[in-house]
Image: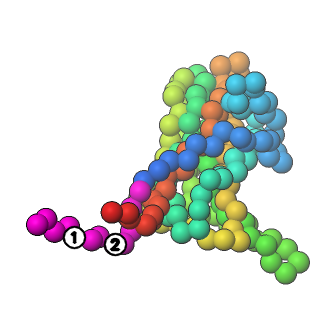
């Protein structure tokens, strides 16, 4: 006779959410191309791009995020990219918009592949109802033809507790 042990509980599942449905923010000039990327040309000061984060569930834990794309730059002309993971909730008469974690000053003077992650290794933001999440990307480019940036999107790393089935 074979005996089976019954396991109950939760399994930790890791997943990454890919977000490329961004839109222009309130500052600067950028252009969304048919392939879904966002192009920021030369001579831009703090142009913003907003990437809503969807596909998360109540109880998921955000462990990290990245900005991906390409940076064009040349010596003496800096292109910089910053990103801010934020959460928004409604309230009485106003909304609250708070920063969770940032990617600061990815700053280069040469053409560079962009794949920059947040530096906080202890990030563990628990997703709850009533909050909406987005990543605000800010790009500054020098005033020369070689300085620009292509943002292909952002990625959010999650740990998800899911019921185990045996």
Q: How many marks?
A: 2
The colour scheme applied to this rendered structure is: rainbow
In this rendering, would 67 be left or right of 23? Answer: left
Give the CA separation, mark 1 to mark 2: 10 Å
Is 133 within the magenta?
A: no
Residue at left offset 66%, top offset 71% = 129
Which residue is labeled 1 in the image? Answer: 5
Q: Is residue 95 visible?
A: yes
Residue at left offset 70%, top offset 30% = 36
Quarter-wise, where is residue 153 in the image? top right
Residue 119 image offset from top left, x and y in percent:
46, 54
Q: Which region shows up in magenta?
A: 1-13
Residue 12 image offset from top left, x and y in percent:
39, 61
Q: Is residue 43 above or below residue 161?
A: above
Query: Please, which residue is most extreme toward the top here?
Result: 145
Query: Please, which residue is most extreme toward the bottom here?
Result: 92
- State whether the magenta stretch is mostly helix, strand or loop: loop
Q: Is residue 1 above or below residue 41?
A: below
Residue 77 image offset from top left, x and y in percent:
62, 27
Q: Is residue 155 above or below residue 14?
A: above
In the image, 146 versus 116, the foreground residue is: 116
In the image, 7 versus 129, the foreground residue is: 7
Of the 4 image quadrants, the one containing the C terminus is bottom left
Quarter-wise, where is residue 75 in the image? top right
Residue 154 image offset from top left, x and y in percent:
59, 43
Q: Dot 2: few (<14), some (14–19), or many (≥20) neighbours within 10 Å?
A: few
Secondary structure beneath label 2: loop
Q: Looking at the rendered structure, which numbered label has been put on residue 8?
A: 2
Is 8 within the magenta?
A: yes
């Amino acid at each position: 006779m074979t005996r089976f042990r019954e396991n109950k509980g939760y399994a930790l599942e890791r997943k990454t959410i890919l977000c490329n449905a961004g839109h222009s923010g309130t500052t600067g000039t950028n252009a969304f191309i048919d392939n879904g990327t966002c192009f920021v040309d030369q001579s831009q000061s703090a142009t913003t791009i907003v990437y809503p984060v969807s596909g998360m569930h109540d109880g998921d834990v955000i462990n990290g995020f990245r900005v991906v794309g390409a940076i064009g730059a040349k010596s003496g002309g800096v292109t910089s990219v910053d990103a801010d993971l934020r959460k928004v909730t409604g309230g009485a008469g106003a909304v609250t918009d708070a920063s969770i974690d940032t990617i600061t000053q990815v700053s280069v003077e040469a053409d560079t592949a962009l794949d920059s992650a947040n530096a906080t290794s202890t990030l563990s933001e628990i997703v709850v109802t009533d909050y909406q999440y987005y990543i605000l990307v800010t790009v500054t480019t020098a005033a020369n033809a070689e300085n620009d940036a292509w943002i292909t999107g952002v990625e959010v790393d999650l740990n998800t507790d899911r019921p185990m089935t045996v």
